[in-house]
Each structure stands twice: as C-alpha cells, then as structure tokens.
Image (spheres, rainbow, N blue to C red):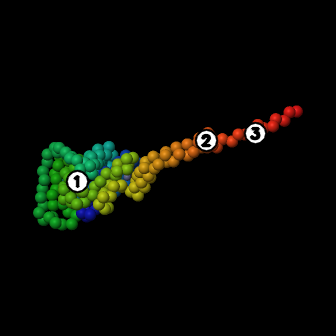
Amino acid sequence: MKKERVLPWLVELSCVNAASLAKGRPGDLPNLIYELRQWLDLEPDEPLNAEVSDLEKKPARLQAMIDRVAELLGAVADRKSFRADYSGGSVILDAGKLGSEGGRALSYRDANLEDAVLRVALDDLYEDVEAALRIQRCEEPECLRVFLAERKNQKYCSHRCANKMASRVYRKTHRKERAERERARYEHQVKGRTAPSGRVARRPRARVES
Ligand SMILES: [Zn+2]
C-alpha cells in the first residue's frame, strides 16, 4: 500500500461495521480483507495469512480488531495515550526493503493478528507524524466521528456537520435577541390595550329591542 493511502485507509477502517459489511454487497468484505493484507504486507510464509483469510468467516473477530484500531485513532484524535499489551512474537528487519515504496522492511511475527494490526498501525502513525496529527474528532456534538482533516484547523468532518454547527451557534446567539424582541412585542400589545392615553370611551352600542 502506498504511503499516502495508509492513514486515510486506517481512518476508513476504524469506521467499518463488519456485520453490515458482511451482509452488504458480496465483494465488500473480501475487498476489505484484501486491503488489510496489502496494508500489513505479510510475507507469503507468515502464519498470520491464515488468520487474515479466516476473518471472512468471523466478522465478530474482525470487528473486535476494528474497534481496537478505532480506539487507537480516537486516542490520537483526542491527543491522549493508548496502550497495547502484546503477547509476544518477533520482529524481523529485512534491510533490502528499507525505503522501498509500499513494502514493509519490518515484519511482525506476532502471536495473533490483532497484535500485528495494532503494531503496524502504531508504526504508521509514528512514521508519518504530520498526517497523524491531521487525525481529528469532529466537533459537531451529535457526530464526534474521527476523521482525517484535509487542512489545518478543520473542526468538522464534513460540510454537513459544519452547517449543522453553524445553525446551532446561530440559534444560540439569536435566542436571547429573539426573546427580547418577543417580549418587546408582547409589551407593546399589552400597552396598546391598557395605556390610559389610548383609552377611548366607547359609546354604548344601541340595543335593538324587538
Ligand atoms: Zn461530523
């Protein structure tokens, strides 16, 4: 996987619902697993390959892994710490792959796939700090989604959330003004009815007797 694609992909992965993906279009889940394999850049002889293939039949397992990635990216977005305890394994450096596009020089022969995924994700975040710092949490209170900002100081994940927030702020700042306007109108109406100067002595209406 190309370097520019890595963090956007991780952010996308963190939002995936494995169960609905499994029930969705037939190619969706295999595509995700294909990309996962590309991203991990596993060697053909790595035992983890089998575990990756197995995910297709185990969406719950995939979801547990995605949830951990989401937790990690959430911690990055909130600038908090994240801890992963791994259950051992080994790391192999293939110096021949150093600096090669898309290939990983480090390969993790971790005991399980979740450990490998977290370790690779941690590596990617650490390796591209500039991009990692673009991982933000949407400030729209009903959204709070983790997203990859396209520019600095981008507070909302989408135009939709930015607009929603703008109208929320508008309503809030105008609530006081509107309340004052309404009170003034009310007082005006009440005064209009009771002001002594405005009182007009009405002539009693002539009663028609039959
Ligand atoms: Zn949002």
Distance of label 1 from label 2 (alpha carbons):
75 Å
Residue that mark 1 sits on: 121
Q: Nearer the viewer, mark 1 or mark 2?
A: 2
Gap between marks 1 and 3, in whole Å? 88 Å
Q: Is residue 128 rendered to the left or right of residue 174?
A: left
- Circle 1 Cα neighbour tier, 10 Å, few/some/many (<14 / 14–19 / ≥20): many
Along the polypeptide, which appears first: circle 1 or circle 3?
A: 1
Q: Which amino acid does label 3 sit on?
A: Arg
**Is 152 displayed left or right of 85 in the figure?**
right
Q: Is mark 3 on a helix, strand or loop?
A: loop
Q: Percent position (x, y) of residue 69?
A: 26, 49
Pick the quarter of the image with the C terminus.
top right
Label 2 and label 3: CA atoms lie apart by 19 Å
Residue 14, image x, y percentages? 31, 51
Q: Does the residue at mark 1 contact the one at mark 2 (Cβ under 8 Å)?
A: no
Q: Which of marks 2 and 3 is nearer the N terminus?
A: 2
At 53% from the left and 45% from the top, the residue drawn is: 184
- The residue wearing badge 3 is 203
Residue drawn at (76%, 37%) of the image: 204
Question: What number is the disc on residue 195?
Answer: 2
Residue in front for this viewpoint, 161 or 74: 161
Q: Which residue is drawn at 24% across and 57% down?
A: 132
Name the mark on residue 39. Answer: none
Estimate how packed mark 2 is, as few (under 14), some (14 to 19) or many (20 or more) residues with alpha carbons within 10 Å: few
Instruction: Tell me the kind of residue under disc 2.
Output: Ala
Q: In which quarter of the image is residue 43?
A: bottom left
Identity of the residue furthest to the bottom in this view: 100
Q: Does the residue labelled 3 lie within 8 Å of ligand 1?
A: no
